[in-house]
Amino acid sequence: MRPVYLHGSAVSTTWRDASRSLTDLIFECVRTALGTAGISAADVGATVLAAHDLVDGRGLTSMVTAPAAATYLKDETRLGDDGALAFVLGDARVRSGSVDTCLVAAWGRASEGPIDEIAHALFDPFTARPLALTEIAVSGMRAARCLGDFPGYGRWRGAAAARRGVRPADPSRVPATAWPLRAGELPVWADVVAAVVLGSQPGPVRVGGVGMSTEPYELGDRDLTGLTALRTASAQALTDAGVDAASIDVLELDGLTLFDEALAAEAVGAAARGDGMSLLANSPRVNAGGGSAAGYCAPAMGLVRVARAAERLRNATTSQVGLATGASVVAAQVQAAVVLEGA
């Protein structure tokens, strides 16, 4: 198996930019990623995309949007899933030797549709939708359980929220709330595009390991605060890289809300059970750019976390190791983890 390197990345976070269509946003972000990698679209051997028809409001969305992501006359795969899972597939394409260079792109435009209604439509129509469940509602259920079981969550939630320090791009749009979540713990909805360029030639960031796992579909069959799939995916990625959670310098953890990010910190082994919120409040290692408060829209966020981790590793003055994660709907059922190593 060949080594895989991350050569370039880009993230675009905007809100209701009337001057640019979705394809414009995708094209500009992908062009920036290719530029930082020092290559052109002609050098790309394959593309892997993460985009969701329901979020984009376009049936078979890649037929409309993929050309803007440098896929014209290319080997293209599209997942209706999180961008981190697309990254895992792109890594496999390069690692297996089927292509030398692979572009991975993901996007979601929250400003184009009703977020809670889209989320509600993804739940099972017979067992979950009658309960008015949404992604935010499930996060509220997780938060209530954490506040009841772990005193540290209530003690540190204010400090962790304040540390995010990010304000919505559009203050007129207030995200839907779900008790007991507070406004500062919710995501800031945004129009998000992320792109990374992977290759077999040595580059500034090496992909040390990847992992992917899933949980049962039904919410009642899951441990909502244990995030079993993320525990499995991160353990696999860390084992592949030959490192442990204690040696990770950079953590970019996907989570819809502050509580989801705290639980993710525990699942990857960066914090003990019940101490995830304390880690978010006190450690600069975790989501230095603000996490979901810096702009959020599925299914782009896992790839955003990978790109942010790579950026932090490139800017570090010493060689460091990073871990990025991505969670997929419904309610973080599928999880992916990526270990990155700086030069």
Image: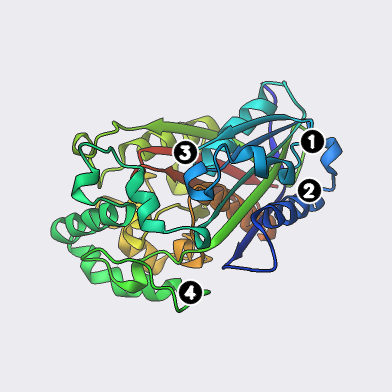
Q: Secondary structure at mark 2?
A: helix
Disc nearer the start of the sequence (2/1) = 2
Question: Does residue 338 appear in this view?
Answer: no
Percent x, y for residue 122? Answer: 36, 42
Query: Horizontally, is 222 left or right of 312 in the view?
Result: left
Cα separation, mark 2 vs mark 1, equals: 9 Å
Q: Kindly report which numbered mark, 2 or 3, lies closer to the viewer in this rendering.
A: 2
The residue that label 4 is drawn on is: 168
Residues tagged 2 and 1 counted as in contact (Cβ below 8 A): yes
Identify residue type, mark 1. Answer: Val
Q: Can you say whether 295 is above or below 50 in the image? A: below
Q: Kindly report which numbered mark, 3 or 4, lies closer to the viewer in this rendering.
A: 4
Q: Can you say whether 275 is above or below 185 in the image? A: above
Disc nearer the start of the sequence (3/4) = 4
Disc nearer the start of the sequence (2/4) = 2
The residue that label 1 is drawn on is: 44
The residue that label 2 is drawn on is: 34
Cα separation, mark 2 vs mark 4, equals: 29 Å
Disc nearer the start of the sequence (1/4) = 1
Identify residue type, mark 3. Answer: Ala
Q: Can you say whether 270 is above or below 316 in the image? A: above
Percent x, y for residue 290? Answer: 48, 66
Please give the name of the residue rendered at 59% of the width and 38% of the height, measured from the top-left corner. Answer: 87
Percent x, y for residue 284? Answer: 48, 65
Cα separation, mark 2 vs mark 3, equals: 24 Å
Cα separation, mark 1 vs mark 4, equals: 35 Å
Q: Residue furthest left?
A: 148
197 vs 151, nearest the viewer: 197
Query: Horizontally, is 299 left or right of 277 in the view?
Result: right
The residue that label 3 is drawn on is: 336
62 vs 200, nearest the viewer: 62
Q: For residue 329, which quarter of the picture? A: top left
